[in-house]
Each structure stands twice: as structure tokens, then as C-alpha cells.
Image: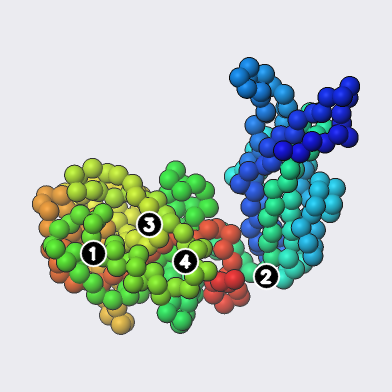
Amino acid sequence: MINNTQYSTGGKVNVPLDPPSSFAASAGNAKVTLTWTDPPDKTSQPSGQTIATWSYTRIVRKTGSQPTGPHDGELVVSSSVRDQYATSGFVDDGLTNDTAYYYAAFAYSTDGVASAGAFANATPIAGTPLSQLAEGTLIKILENGGPVEFYLAKHSYEPDLNGAGRELLVRKDCYNHQVWDDSNFNFWESSSILSWLNSSYKSLFNSKVQNYIGTTTYRFTNSGDSLVTTSDAFFLLSLTELGRSGYNSNIEGSTLPIASTLRIARFNGAATTQWTRTRNFGGDTYVYQLNESGNAVTSAANFPYACRPCFTLPSTALVDTNNALIET
């Protein structure tokens, strides 16, 4: 806790607020997007009396080193609307690419007392964010060291589960033919293919891309036939997302904008049957696929069909002029 005697009166030292929380800086092309949560008012215990009331948060910026105080560096923004930038963020633009910028956030009370600082840094880089590309655009991402094309399948995937700004990427061509489940059960949550996607397949991406991908929350039908949610780095599309339905299937998500493109899957240049994550709950062994014509069919979970991984990236992720992901 900081005691700032500059604002002391009558021998009483005003109490600083906690610093802003979740302070983060995300780099873009000649800009940095800043997000943070303003602190609550501070109360004394056990009386509950307010002893420090939030007034505004001040953000300062420096190059070369981290700011040491609220007046060390250039003022970026002073926000007096609580949590105004917690989600969408404040954009600090007009910056120089490939230059590291250091930011500090300080919360001020109505008594004029500054909190301790919260710190973040980012380096702008030239590129186009995924959010500015059309759905259906092909993005190149290094997989096992070589560039592979992925469709930008949907902006803001499942925003009620993931918040705004997660971009769905779907592999253009299937990776391999994979048994859905070795034990021939159609339970997605314990399936062999889900485990493989998030271990062997995930390892084909470098650590920076894996961190970018993080995890995505999505809907699926569990072994009890209920529609539930789970979170993984990699997963498969559902029957619903591909614009198809089945007699013994739940509605898992919503039809993707480029579903008609994704219905036909290819492996080594030829149309092939692709797995979905959707179980046929008429029994415990059958899973839905789309066949070579893009129609819904079912087969036993221990039969090998084509695997087409998908995942999400943040909308701020950048691509270069060749639509290759900038992985730095």
C-alpha cells in the first residue's frame, strides 16, 4: 500500500485504491489495444465505511523502460467511466512498428491519491488483424514447420461462451484418417480423437501459436444425451455448424457462414468423409459424419474417417500481405 503524503491534511494520510487489475496490452499494426478493470472503492473493515472512492484511471506510456510513476511518461488516456475499456479496450494508435512500448495504469481516488501501478508492454507490428478479413479467407499457419491453409470460418465464434473476438479457423483439407474412438463409444468427452487433437496434433504448432490459440468453449452432446459445454484448444465441427441435422442429434451451436464450403472435405485432393463431434444418441457407438457429397451419415466410432481440426484465435491476431499468420 502506498502512503502519498502530498495530499495529507491535518496529519491524516489519505488511503490509495488498489491498482487497476487485468491490465493487458495487445499489439496491432502501428497500435496497441489496452484493457483493464478499474478498482472498486475501498472500505474499512468491519464497519464497511468507504475510505477511498475511485475517480479515474490514468495510463502513461514510455519507450525504453517501464514508467516509474503516474507522471513518468506520456499520458495515453485518463478514463473516468468505470470499466469503460475492460472489454473493447482503448486503442493507442499512431505508434511505430517494431518499437517496444511500456505502459503503466494508476487509479486515482476522489482525494487525488494515486494507487500503485499496474504494468504491461507490447510491440506493434505491421499486419492485418483477422477481424478485418472476410469470412472464408484462407490463412496460412505453420504446422509441423510448414505452411498449411485454414479457413477463417466465423468471426466472434460462440460469443456468449467466449466473449467477443474469437475467430474460428478450420483446416482447409483434412489432416489424416483417424478412428473417432478406439473403444467404439460415441462419447465426445472421452473420445480418442479429442485426446489426439489436444496432444499429438497440438504439438505440431510452435509454443507461440499454442499460446495464441489457448482454449475455446463450445457446445456438444455428452454421454447422457444432454447438450453441455466444454473447453479445448482443438476440436471438430458439429453437424449443426456444417448446416446439417440428424434424427438422433442435438443442435450444437449454429450454422457457420461458410458451411456450404466446409461440407465437402478433401484429403490428398479427393473428396472424403469427415468426422463431426456429434454423437448419434440412439445408441452408444454411432457418430455423425458428412460423406463425400456433404450429406449427414452415421458410422461406428471405431471406423477411420477424415479428421479436420479447428480452433480459434483472437481477433487481434495479425496476418502479413500473404495472409500468413504473424506468429511473433
Q: Which residue is mark 2?
A: 126
Gap between marks 3 and 4 measured at Cα: 12 Å
Gap between marks 4 and 1 measured at Cα: 21 Å
* Relative to 27, 171 lies left or right: left
Q: Position of residue 279 (x, y in %)?
A: 20, 54
Q: Position of residue 256 (x, y in %)?
A: 38, 56
Badge 4 density bin: few <14, some 14–19, many ≥20, Cα 10 Å: some
- Going from N to C along the chain, the mark reached first, 2 or 4, is 2
State if disc 2 and disc 1 touch (CB < 8 Å). no
Kind of element beneath mark 4: helix
Q: Which residue is mark 3?
A: 232
Foreground label between 3 and 2: 3
Image quadrant of residue 96?
Answer: bottom right
The one nearer the camera, 24 or 257, is 24
Gap between marks 1 and 2 measured at Cα: 40 Å
The one nearer the camera, 276 or 206, is 206
Q: Which residue is mark 1?
A: 192
State if disc 4 and disc 3 touch (CB < 8 Å). no
